Amino acid sequence: MRKRFGIILTIVLAIGVLVVINSLAYVSEDEAQDSELSPNRSTYNARATGTRALYDFLSESGYKVMRWREAPAKLLGDDGNQIKTFVIIGDTRVPVNDDEAESLLHWVKNGGRLVIVDRRPEDHLLPHSGEWVVTTEFVNYPFDADPAQPESMTKDVKPVSPAQPTLLTQNIASVMPSRFMAAIRFFPESNDELQPAPSPSEHGDPDDEEQSIVVDEEPGTTAASPAPVTHLTSKNSALLVDYAYGQGRIVLLSDPFMVANGGIGLNDNLQLAINLLSTADGVIAFDEFHQGRGITRNAIASYFSGTPVLAICGQIALIIILLLWTRGRRFGRPLPLPHVDRRSSLEYVASMAELQQRARAFDLAIENVYSRTRRVLARYAGIDYNSPRSEIAKRVAERSSVDSHQLETLMRQAEEAINGGAISELQSIHLVRRLREIEGSLGLRMRSRDVRQSIQNI
């Protein structure tokens, strides 16, 4: 464990350094992104360019709002039956491709209402209305103001009053656009000159709703004029228009600042946003799919999107893979595995006893027992191990009740057997038993393990 403590400490320090670096990088990058050049118009964004204030207000006011996080093709299925207004705000992070625009416009043609709030929307999101072509152009560029400072965004801009009373301008005295609002242009496709927007009075009663009425070719029938209707104008340029497309309508507001967190509270901008989104009954869906919040992505990755957590996890995974790879590679010459001898001492004794028995080497068995008996007898007598057996027997007899002659005879028989004298298996067993009896009578018993081993040697 001590050898690996340094490695573990190094890994922990490396992970800590990565967390600090990614956190610092995240903060600086996050602050740099919130500008009019690269805005984030998502309803999840609570900073100046976001639209969270509008979404939360509508939600808390009882309007049916939701964040649409699926592809526009889902609007044509059962999921889109309850959606009546679809809102796209700003230059989205994920562009709307041709197939998605086709699905979205097909939904509008079937009766949906598309609200686009952008300075320069995609051309395929603004289809022709009859022979009328709708487009936008920048008036003031570049976008060099701080969106968090409304006074900078609206410098030298005057409030805009409604061009005519319509459902989209009701309860509005004036609105405050930014100085970066775009000009909406529309003209007949057959003419190259831009035409002013028609007012309801040009085609019928001004008290009618937004669309004008013209006489059809067949007597007794009427049809809605395809010409766009202007609701707000500034400096002879349209700021808010809408026009019919199939059974639905398309509404275009050319300044996202008016509905963003930084400008929604100016003048009657909030009332204008409510009019744009709540004219049609039903659910109001804010497009989050093209703001990079689509549910097609992993739920965990989507939750931590925009934070350094994903980068930190990726770097930690890379460190772990590198550690596993380096630990799995051999460094130096191959070494054999350590050999562990799993045999016990009893197995060794049993093996030696079996070999001696098969070889009839009874002299070796007697030698193993007699050598220890002679050593304990010499210690008991208090003389040297190499002393004559007669001297050992005499001294032992003096200190005990053992007969000196019998002990000397027993020792002589054992030494003769060890030196090659003829002896049978039964005789060797009898001789060893007598040696053990002498030890027992003198109180010189061996350890139980030695006793078992000595018996196995016979």
Image (cartoon, grey):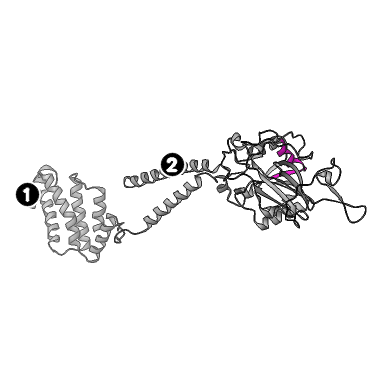
> What is the span of residues highlighted in magenta in the rendered image?
271-285
The residue drawn where x is 66% and y is 52% is: 122
In this rendering, the label closer to the viewer, 1 or 2: 2
Which is more toward the observer, 345 or 316?
316
Q: Residue 166's image quarter?
A: top right
Q: How crowded is mark 1: few (under 14 residues within 10 Å), some or many (20 or more)?
A: some
- Residue 207 visible here: yes
Q: What residue type is labelled 2?
A: Val
Q: What residue type is labelled 1?
A: Glu
How far across and how far down the image is residue 25, in percent?
Answer: 47, 43
Residue 226 shown in magenta: no
Instruction: Using the image, determine if residue 13 lies above or below residue 343.
Output: above
How far across and how far down the image is residue 160, in percent?
Answer: 71, 37
**Mark 2 sits on what residue?**
20
Which is more toward the observer, 316 or 108?
108
Is 40 left or right of 349, judged from the image as shown? right
How far across and how far down the image is residue 57, in percent?
Answer: 68, 35
Q: What is the secondary structure assignment of the residue under circle 1?
A: helix
Residue 274 shown in magenta: yes
